[in-house]
Image (spheres, rainbow, N blue to C red):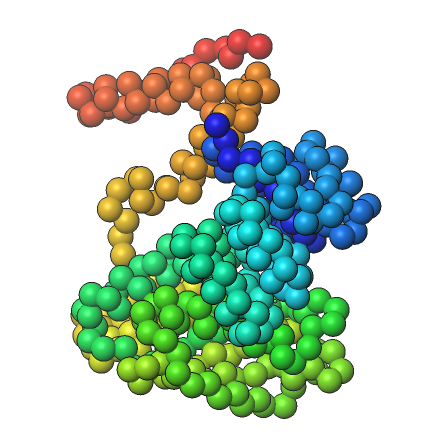
Amino acid sequence: PALRVAVLGVGMMGQDHARRLASVINRAELVAVSDVDAARTDAVAAEFGVRAIHDPMAAVADPEVDALVIATPGFTHEELVLAALAAGKPVLCEKPLTTSPESSRRIVEAEAALGRQLVQVGFMRRFDAEYVQLRGLIASAELGRPLFLHCVHRNASTPPNFNSAMLVLDSVVHEVDIVRYLTGEEIVAVRVLAPRSTSAAPEGLLDPQFVILETESGILVDVEIFVNTTIGYEVRTELVAERGTARTGLGVGMVTQTTAGWGGRIPADFKERFESAYDVQVQRWVDAVRAGTIDGPGVWDGYAAAAVCAAGVRAQQTGERVEIALGARPA
Ligand code: ISE
């Protein structure tokens, strides 16, 4: 049976997760949404044809909800996650886990007391193929030991009420997690410098900032966090190791620079190269089939390809120019 999931908090991120659960993810079913804004809860519930539960605590307790995605504001996470733990329900909690180390620690203790892991935090960069590759490169020690990680994290603009602390708490938190993931080390120290602020920043917001992290073995990480670039979403990371460098986030997969020159990985096969395309294809096919149709190339496309290919084989064999006539296409 499908995992019955409720999404708590249906602002921008929660709505995106609701959509994903309702239409992208297999073996899971979006069954309910919940938000303190009752009108919004009702609207999103209606959009996806699921239950609206106005009290998030009631959603946690609901016997027809197996698991929870928590996408409410950070300050509500502690109470909700603890309630989920008490109810024994798995949680995917958006970052940050909570807004203070003390409250996060309480969750750590509560889960430890339970004796099983029920909470995953939404640090989605760990599922990004380029970061996975970069982690493998570091682990292989092929380029020697890591020395620096240069990180660029840019957003076009900030939502209302975004303050200077949030550049670290809300934004650089991603680099914090990904550095721990990439290096397998804890971060032992942090410094922040800032140039003058961009004139595009709202009054009083310190933006950009330069955050320097040190890991336990002595890797230095600099993060340029710049959240009012007016341009778009840019997240790049460059590893500098003893015998080479590697960059991610260029939109072309990871690029390395070594004595051999610069280069990227060539996918091993179609499954690797088109992995996400296959996912989308099959999911859209499933959805269309359930609606009694298809959503992609049909038999006419199959026929045309076969016709062209057969002509191609003849051309190979004869050395001639072979024309293709498909004939009329049925209505
Ligand atoms: C936001 O909450 C995110 O998680 C984004 O990934 C980040 O780029 C942005 O700065 C945060 O506010």
Q: Indicate the position of residue 197 as horizontal and vertical percent values.
A: 65, 86
Tell which of 249 and 162 is nearer to you.
162
Residue 170, image quadrant: bottom right
Position of residue 268 relative to residue 283, above or below, is below
Where does the image place residue 178, in percent across and percent down from the top left? 41, 67
* Residue at horizontal 53 percent and vertical 74 percent from the top: 101
Along the horizontal axis of the image, is 45 left or right of 21?
right
Q: Is residue 170 visible?
A: no
Q: Outermost residue, right direction?
A: 39
In the picture provided, is 87 more to the left or to the right than 218? right
Q: Is residue 17 above or below residue 290?
A: below
**Where 261 sits versus 264, above or below?**
below
The vertical placement of 291 against 155, above or below, is above
Q: Is residue 54 left or right of residue 261?
A: right
Which residue is at 56% across, 47% downward?
87
Q: Residue at x 53, y 67 (%)?
A: 106
Residue nearest the observer in this picture, 93 or 158:
93
Which residue corresponds to the image point at 30% horizontal and 78% vertical from the top-left? 240
Instruction: Report whether residue 142 is seen.
Output: yes
